[in-house]
Image (cartoon, grey):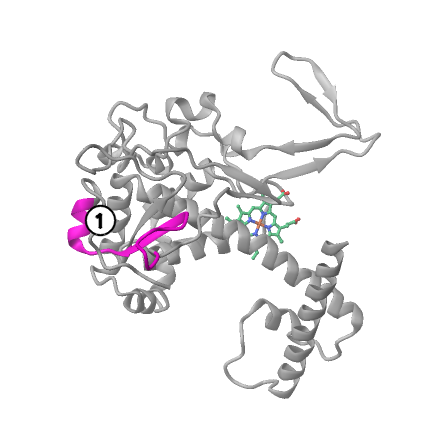
Amino acid sequence: MKRRRLGKRIDLLIKGIISRKHTEQQIHAGGDGKSRSILSLSLQDTKTLTPELIDVTCDQLKTSLLAGHDTTSTMLAYCFYELSHTPRVLDAVRDELNRLLGTEEDPEVVRSRLVSPDGPNLINRMSYISAVIKETLRLHPPAATARYSKPGACFTVRAPAGEDHCLDGVIIYNCETLIHRDRAVYGDTANDFVPERWLSDGSDSSRNAPMDKPDINSRTIPVSAWRPFERGPRSCIGQEFANIEARVIIAVVARRYDFTKVGLGELATDKEGRPVLQENGQYKTKSHLYNTRQVTSKPVDGMKPSACSEQGGMDTGWETARSNSASRGLLSGALPRNQQTYRE
Ligand code: HEM
């Protein structure tokens, strides 16, 4: 009941915005500086806004907002989480950004390079960062999917032992988390964060990959074994958008700030207070950060960025600190505790 009331309020709010935007566009039709927002584009060339059109546009906006916001933010949170305790990967990300964008890491400078005519080309060349995003989505897929086979459709699947099962009338849930951690595909490193596996030419994989791990790379991984956006005609329409968004955000943030998880998944330290590097190239953690399912799958503590509190204590989530060259050196040794703290 509460949910329905809330749904109605959201609909009302969004429909008001649609009507206002439509009026605005009619007044400024043909004017310069047209907005490229999803709403503006969907109202483009619409002379009369009928109640049906308002309903459809409202549904489309809700889908884009709900399907696109939660998933992308979870992906980014996990991306920074993995970077924060995999020093060789963070170094490689920063190296790639230095190579492509120059060593100036001021967000304004990075932004202006990315929106320049050369921007799309630079974004396309972020191959290591793409591998980081791909590996983050492999280990922490924010979404999954379900399919329903209608009775009488005669949809059968063959089990590994060879017997056929008719799944008519059954809802089938594709659990991406299980699929993405299949040892038969991903080998001994199935549970480890190894972006190098996605570098198809393998050239970078030897440089930073754990030495004793098998050389698994994208050439040996069947395409259907990676499906965070699902596959086929109903797969995610926002996957390219999410990917570009993530690359841009990583480019702006990864060299500028160091992220330190607090609470669940916090780094374990040795007697001298230094993080403990494990054989798999990742720092040891005190506890395991796990997900909860709230429509999408997200970290149980929300992993919200949080600055140090006035008393010096911290909420669960992140401690975000301005990165500097000194801290970068420290990342593979001690935690960058002595830095200026970034506050929202
Ligand atoms: C990391 C980010 C994202 C992930 C992991 C993700 C994942 C998914 C998955 C698993 C599906 C179900 C596909 C299926 O059932 O076959 C889906 C559908 C969808 N996604 Fe995404 N998504 C992401 C970002 C976005 C963004 C940014 C948008 C829009 C701006 C978006 C819009 C949609 C829409 C509209 C559908 C429904 C497609 C259909 O039913 O035909 N998603 N997404």
Magenta segment, which residues? 309-330
246 in the magenta segment: no
- Depth order, front residue of 148/277: 277
Mark 1: few/some/many CA within 10 Å (<14, 14-19, 20+): many
Does residue 20 appear left or right of residue 265 in this picture? right
Residue found at x 67% / y 61%: 60
Image side of residue 231 versus residue 47, left or right: left
Residue 297 against residue 64 in the figure, above or below: above
Q: Amino acid at mark 1?
A: Pro
Residue at 34 percent across and 66 percent down: it is 111
Question: Residue 316 lies in magenta, yes or no?
Answer: yes
Quarter of the image with the N terminus in it: bottom right
**Quadrant location of the C terminus in the rendered image:** bottom left
Q: Nearer the viewer, residue 302 or 99?
A: 302
Q: Position of residue 268 (x, y in %)?
A: 29, 35
Examine the rendering and report whether any part of residue 130 can be seen.
no
Return the residue at label 1.
336
Mark 1 vs ligand 1: CB under 8 Å? Answer: no
Residue shown at the point (73%, 55%) measured from the top left: 2
- In the image, is residue 103 above or below residue 167? below
Query: Where is residue 48 shown, x and y percent of the image?
Result: 75, 79
The residue furthest front is 311
Q: Residue furthest right?
A: 152
Residue at position x 67%, y 76% in the image: 45
Q: How many marks?
A: 1
Image position, residue 89 (x, y; %): 29, 41
- In the picture as drawn, the residue positioned furthest to the top comes out as 161
The quarter of the picture where residue 203 lies is top left
Query: Element at badge 1?
Result: loop
| Front one among 330 and 50 | 330
Say left or right for 50 vs 340.
right
Question: x and y percent of residue 30 in the render?
Answer: 58, 85
